[in-house]
């Protein structure tokens, strides 16, 4: 991580580990503008440079610009964290035309959404594990559902699910938060005071890494119902659980053909969604950068990422694998 790890204990532990860039050459990598993607990039960049001799050029991006650039310019070479359900028709055409390869689920099982309760509440009242139990016991969850802010996609879905489950008819007021900050703060305040909290959230995120929360059972995922629930004008919304969102590492076909060893590494890089949430919580608690969170992960999880490497890279990074 030549951009930011000079002077850290990690680089001091690796004198001479970085290899000549001509082993791999220059490769470009998109860095999306959210926290988990920045950590994935930092870890991937370090391993590619220090283990495989790549000269990694990190390109700030977002989903639409990255996919557009792939379509028009065949770059960046690597997009380490792409939420494919938000990538659109251009992405679908790139796949159909064989111009990109989907390597792995970099977050496993993927991006998660749901309606959550604090674990201490569910442990005390196991009947709250299901939406039926919540509806039968509105007082136990504080009589309120903490909804997404206006303008978020989850707001439309949760509004429709609130109608499908008749939350208000069952004594649960729907409270629409004004921002993501107040939604997160409401969870934090309730958790720290061991009070009821019931609402929507998603991961990987700092709050789900910091607080032990339980995603209640909303029933089976119904694709038709879920898609209809994404329309604010759906007249008769139906219940459905939330699907897991695929979060993928993709590369261009050219990169995969010209860099088989590096492609194998990127195929192996995967984080449990809960692990990423915990990393985000550590980053928040320590006021750390994404690069510092990556260092923390690398220093404390060599048993995981060591298995991602080929034999040569494992030898080069041997001092960190002890």
Image (cartoon, rainbow, N blue to C red):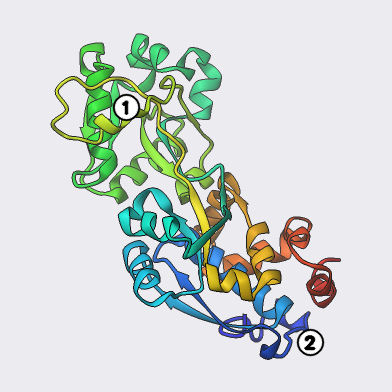
Q: Quadrant of the C terminus?
A: bottom right
Q: Secondary structure at mark 2?
A: loop
- With 78 as the anchor, is 83 left or right in this view? left
Q: Quadrant of residue 195?
A: top left
Circle 2 sits on which residue? 15
**Among all residues in the image, which is located at the extreme top?**
136
Looking at the image, residue 135 lies above or below residue 77: above
- Quadrant in which residue 7 is drawn: bottom right
Q: Earlier in the sequence, mark 2 or mark 1?
A: 2
Q: CA distance from mark 2 to mark 1?
A: 56 Å
Please name whichever residue, 32 or 69, is drawn nearer the observer in this view of the structure: 69
Residues at circles 2 and 1 in contact by the CB criterion of under 8 Å: no
Q: Nearer the viewer, residue 197 or 263?
A: 263
Identify the residue at image location x=46%, y=38%: 244
Crowd class of label 1 (few under 14; some 14 to 19; many from 20; radius 10 Å): few
The residue identified by callout 1 is 224
Q: Label 2 crowding class (10 Å Cα cut-off): few <14, some 14-19, many 20+?
A: few
Q: Residue at x 68, y 70 (%)?
A: 260
User: Which x, y percent locates residue 69?
Assistant: 36, 73
The residue furthest front is 97
Label 1 element class: helix
Q: Is residue 6 above or below residue 194?
A: below
Indicate which disc residue 290 carries. Answer: none
Q: Position of residue 143 (x, y in %)?
A: 29, 20
Question: Which residue is more in the foreground, 61 or 253?
Answer: 253
Q: Is 185 drawn above or below residue 136 in the view shown? A: below
Q: Which quadrant, please, contains the N terminus? A: bottom right
């Amino acid at each position: 991580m030549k951009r930011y790890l000079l002077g850290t204990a990690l680089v001091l532990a690796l004198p001479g580990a970085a290899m000549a860039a001509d082993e791999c050459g220059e490769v470009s990598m998109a860095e999306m503008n959210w926290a988990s993607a920045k950590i994935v990039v930092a870890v991937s960049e370090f391993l590619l440079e220090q283990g495989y001799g790549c000269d990694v050029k990190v390109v700030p991006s977002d989903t639409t610009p990255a996919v557009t650039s792939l379509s028009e310019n065949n770059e960046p070479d690597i997009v380490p964290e792409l939420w494919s359900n938000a990538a659109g028709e251009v992405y679908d055409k790139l796949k159909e035309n064989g111009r990109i390869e989907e390597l792995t689920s970099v977050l496993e099982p993927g991006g998660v959404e749901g309606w959550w309760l604090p674990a201490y509440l569910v442990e005390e009242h196991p009947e709250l594990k299901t939406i039926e139990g919540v509806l039968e016991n509105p007082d136990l969850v504080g009589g309120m559902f903490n909804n997404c802010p206006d303008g978020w996609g989850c707001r439309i879905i949760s509004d429709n699910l609130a109608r499908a489950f008749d939350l208000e008819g069952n004594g649960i007021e729907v409270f629409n938060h004004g921002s993501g900050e107040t939604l997160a703060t409401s969870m934090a305040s309730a958790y720290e005071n061991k009070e009821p909290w019931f609402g929507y959230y998603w991961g990987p995120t700092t709050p789900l890494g910091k607080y032990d929360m339980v995603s209640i059972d909303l029933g089976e995922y119904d694709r038709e119902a879920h898609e209809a629930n994404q329309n604010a004008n759906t007249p008769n919304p139906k219940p459905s659980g939330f699907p897991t969102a695929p979060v993928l590492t993709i590369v261009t076909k050219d990169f995969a053909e010209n860099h088989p060893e590096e492609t194998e590494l990127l195929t192996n890089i995967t984080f449990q969604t809960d692990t990423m949430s915990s990393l985000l919580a550590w980053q928040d608690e320590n006021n750390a950068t994404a690069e510092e969170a990556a260092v923390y992960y690398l220093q404390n999880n060599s048993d995981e990422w060591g298995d991602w490497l080929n034999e040569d890279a494992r030898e080069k990074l041997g001092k960190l694998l002890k």
